[in-house]
Amino acid sequence: MNYQEAVDYIHSLLAFGIKPGLERIRALLAVLGNPQNDLRFVHVAGTNGKGSTSTMLACILKAAGYKTGLFTSPYVFSFCERIQINNENIPEDALACVVARVKAAIETLNADGIVPTEFEAITAAALLYFKEQNCDYAVMEVGLGGRFDSTNIIPAPEVCVITSISLDHTKILGDTIEQIASEKAGILKRGSACVTTTRQDPTALSVIRDTAKKQGCALCVADANAAQVLSESLTETVFSYQGETYTIHLSGQHQIENAVGVVEAAKQIAGVTQAHIREGLQNTVMRGRMEYRAGTPPMLLDGGHNPECAEALSAVLNRFAPQNITAVIGMMADKDAAKYLKTVLPACKAVYFTKPSNPRAAEPAMLQGLADSVNVKSFTESNPKSALKHAIDATPQEGLVLVCGSFYLLSDLFH
């Protein structure tokens, strides 16, 4: 099996859909020798900020001298981004090797009528790789929910982090904040510490408190309001918290909240010092999440797609971006595109709607129709690369090209 065959095989499992539950991943890992039982973990759940939080924690653990695995989703430019060790993507040949072993295990299970899903397969591949590479820690980002997410097969982690919770995936997780918070708090296990922040939704925070008490988990609610911004721009934020100064190369108030939670979570891990925390935060780079790229004109890339992501992006654009912004936007049809566009487009002078190469992608004309109520020049271009070229040509050097709405779009353009 080569790299492309491995990726194609993983994607082929999408046909089996999303099926919450731990019985399939439990069976799959048993065939593979239960690699999760030989690792130490940090587990991250939430609606927004999981990727940033997971990456920051992995960078801190690396700074502390730990060989650190990181499992995240989705990827932006390469499938290999989903499995990393010490900030390095799994090599393509290593991914092919480990997926071949997972495939063989799945075929064994198929004979007994057990059919693992795509996410279960890649979770198993990550755990197997981390075990065989002798990782000291693995930072695992929840894919969907928490309680029945395949990452929740891990033993009690050193610390669980629950980031901002809002309504998302309501058909699977429930249509109230309380229901969704209950699912996400399902990652809490006896013996683990738990961290969230004071800016958490009050209803969600109440659920997290109750769950932590039932599970006997020590709960830390990081005081995000105690963080003081010292300087900020599109490319860097400097803030103080509890007498310490930290620098993150991330923009937006939401990233300060994420970072404060990370600081408190890192303190729960033996061997991590303030110096490691400062170094790890400063070294964190997030691909495709308000990622600034210098140029003439410069670009800002953001794959976030839900209303909360739109609000965070809008706040950054209104505070730091130049006046002349041309957007390239492609989205999935199952997202709240109307609300997203009404939030982001007022900061733009023009927008090119396009279509990512994904069967769930929304038609550009449909997006253009949703944007009719916003006073912005809009165009449609089915080819993402053509749309980007038009946007670059239309934007003055002192302006900004914004590419946003979907990680699939970013992958099409910058892979």
Image: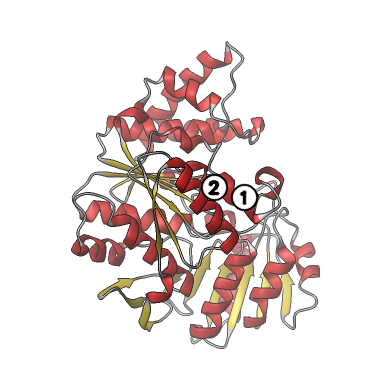
Q: Secondary structure at mark 1?
A: helix
- Residue visible at 71% across and 74% down? 342
334 left or right of 414 in image: right
- What is the distance, in whole Å, between disc 1 and disc 2 at their CAs? 6 Å
- Residue visible at 60% across and 31% down? 12
Q: Residues within 10 Å of mark 1 (few under 14, many from 20)?
A: many
Q: Is residue 294 visible?
A: no
Q: Coloured how?
A: secondary structure
Label 2: which residue?
A: 184
Picture coordinates of residue 396 (x, y %)?
Answer: 54, 85
Label 1: which residue?
A: 180
Q: Secondary structure at mark 2?
A: helix
Marker disc for residue 216: none
- Residue visible at 26% across and 50% down? 269
Disc 1 to disc 2: CB gap under 8 Å = yes
Q: Is residue 25 above or below residue 401?
A: above
Q: Is residue 123 above or below residue 294?
A: above
Quadrant, the N terminus: top left
* Foreground pick, 326 / 37: 37
